[in-house]
Amino acid sequence: MLIIWILVFILSLILLVKSADWFVESSEKIGLALKISPFIIGVTIVSIGTSFPELASSVAAVLKGASEIVTANVIGSNIANILLVIGLSAVAARSLLIKRSLIDLDAPLLAATTGLFIFIVWDRKIVFGEGILLLLAFAVYFLYTVFQRREEVISPELVEILPEGTKIKILPSRVERRREKVKEKPAKLEIKTFLFLILGIVGLVLGANYTIESVLKISELLKVPAGLIAITGIAVGTSLPELVVSVRASIKKKYEIALGNVFGSNVFNILIVAGVPALIKPLAVDYLTFSIGLPFLILATFLFVISGISRRIYIWEGAMYILIYVLFIAKLLSLF
C-alpha cells in the first residue's frame, strides 16, 4: 500500500507541474492572439502561473484541513532553491558572477520579504489579515516590476540556455519556468490552445488533490508528520524546474538568469503561495517546520545575501550550500 501511494505522489506531482505548463502556455497564446502586450502577459499570466504547482497544492492542503503543509512547502521550497539550486549551479559553473543590479535591488527585496514572513509566522500561524498583508506586499512587488523595469532589455543570447527552437520568457531579475516555441507568424487561436487550457486547469485540480491526498496517506502509514513530507518531497519536486533552468544557465555562464530565478521564485513563494491559502483558512506551522525549517531558511537567505555582496559565489561556497542542505535533511529525519 505504501509503494502505491508513493507512486501516486510522484505521478500527481509530475501532473501538477506539467499541467501548470499547459495552462500558462495556452494563456500566453490566447493573450498574444488578443494583442495583449507581451510584457503585460509576462508580469501577469507567466509570473503568477509559474507558482501554480505550489499554489494549487497549498490550496488543496487547506481544503483538506492540512494547512501545516502550506508553510512547510513554502519554507522547504525556499531552502531548496537557495541551498540546492544555487549550490549545484555554483558547483556546475565553478563560480557564479553576480551583477550589481541583483544586489542593489533583488537582494533587499528577498531579505525584506523573508523578514516579513518570519515576523508573521513567529506565532506559528498565518491568519486572514496576515494573508492580506502578504498579498499587498506582492502588489508592491508587481507594480515595481511593471513600472520600474519596463524598459530593461533582455539579451537575445538568453535563448541559448534551452534547446534549439525554444526560448524562455523572463521578467527582469526573474527567470520564468516557461518555454515557448519561437514563432515568426502572428499568434492564432486554435482549438488545441483551448483544449490544453482546459487540460491544464483539470490537471492542476487533480494533481494538487492527489498530491496532498498521497502525502496524508504516506504520513499516516509511516507515522510521520505530513509537514515532514511537504518540506522535503513537495518542496524539492516543485523546485525541480528552477533547478534545471539554473544549472543549465550557470553552465552556459548566464549567471544572472541562474540567480534571478531563485530571487524571483522565493519572493513569489512567500507572498503568493502563503498569502492566498491564508485567505481561505488560517495556516498552522508545525513544530518541525518552525524549529528546524525556519532557522535554516534564515541561515540560507543570510548566506545567499552575504555571498551576493562579494558579487561571486565560488565552487567551494556552492559545495558548502549543498552540505548545509544535507544537514537540513538529516536534522528533519533526526539522523543527528
Image: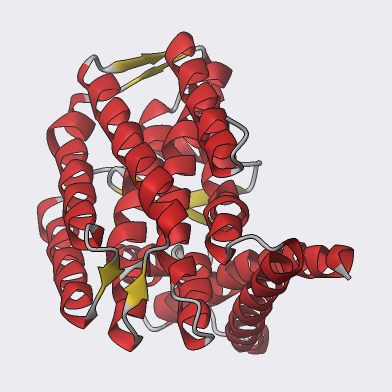
Nearest the eye: 81 or 251: 81
Nearest the eye: 152 or 137: 137
Residue ID at (50%, 76%): 56
Which quadrant of the rendered structure holds the C terminus?
top right
Q: Is residue 169 visible?
A: no
Percent across and percent down for residue 34 are 39, 84
Which quadrant of the rendered structure holds the N terminus?
bottom right
Q: Is residue 14 visible?
A: yes
Percent across and percent down for residue 4 are 87, 69
Q: 122 left or right of 287?
A: left
Q: 324 left or right of 271?
A: right
Nearest the eye: 141 or 317: 317
Residue ID at (34%, 47%): 294
Eyeballing the image, is 150 above or below 246?
below
Q: 2 left or right of 225?
A: right
Percent across and percent down for residue 255 are 40, 27
Q: 136 left or right of 155?
A: left
Eyeballing the image, is 299 above or below 117?
above
Colouring scheme applied when the structure was drawn: secondary structure
Eyeballing the image, is 63 above or below 183?
below
Residue ID at (67%, 84%): 192
Percent across and percent down for residue 13 are 67, 65
Nearest the eye: 256 or 70: 70
Quadrant housing residue 110 = top left
Residue ID at (55%, 23%): 251
- Number of numbered markers: 0
